[in-house]
Image: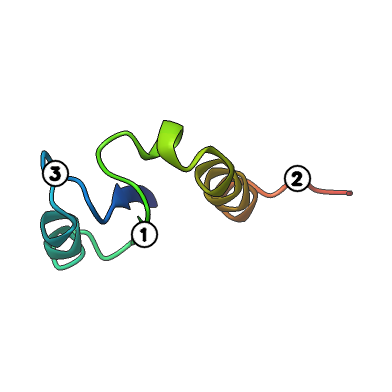
């Protein structure tokens, strides 16, 4: 299955290095790194997180006929 991970570069609870290591065991993992965010990237970088989620959703579940 496809997997999406959005991590904050400044996250001290789930370090970005841990998410990068997941790529070795989850080959379909798509990792996006939020440069200016910590653990709450969905609040700290709302627009960027929303754009990542939206484009990923369209890629994984394309809307036909549009």
Q: For residue 57, what is the image quadrant?
A: top right
Mark yes or no: residue 43 visible. yes
Judge depth for marks 3 and 2 and give the one in front. Answer: 3
Total numbered circles: 3
- Dot 2 alpha-carbon crowd within 10 angstroms: few under 14, some 14 to 19, many 20 or more: few
Residue visible at 19% across and 57% down in the picture: 16
The residue wearing badge 2 is: 63
Residue visible at 88% across and 49% down in the picture: 66
Numbered disc 3: secondary structure? loop
Mark yes or no: residue 1 visible. no
The residue wearing badge 3 is: 14
- Dot 3 alpha-carbon crowd within 10 angstroms: few under 14, some 14 to 19, many 20 or more: some
| Mark nearer the N terminus (1 vs 3) | 3
| Mark nearer the N terminus (3 vs 2) | 3
- Closer to the camera, 17 or 66? 17
Percent position (x, y) of residue 38? Answer: 27, 43
Percent position (x, y) of residue 39? Answer: 25, 38
- Labelled pair 1, 3 in contact (Cβ < 8 Å): no
Numbered disc 1: secondary structure? loop
- Closer to the camera, 31 or 37? 37
């Amino acid at each position: 299955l496809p997997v999406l991970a959005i991590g904050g570069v400044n996250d001290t609870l789930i370090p970005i290095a841990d998410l990068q290591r997941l790529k070795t065991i989850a080959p379909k993992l798509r990792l996006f790194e939020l440069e200016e965010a910590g653990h709450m990237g969905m609040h700290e970088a709302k627009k960027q997180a929303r754009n990542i989620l939206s484009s990923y959703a369209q890629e994984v579940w394309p809307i036909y006929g549009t």
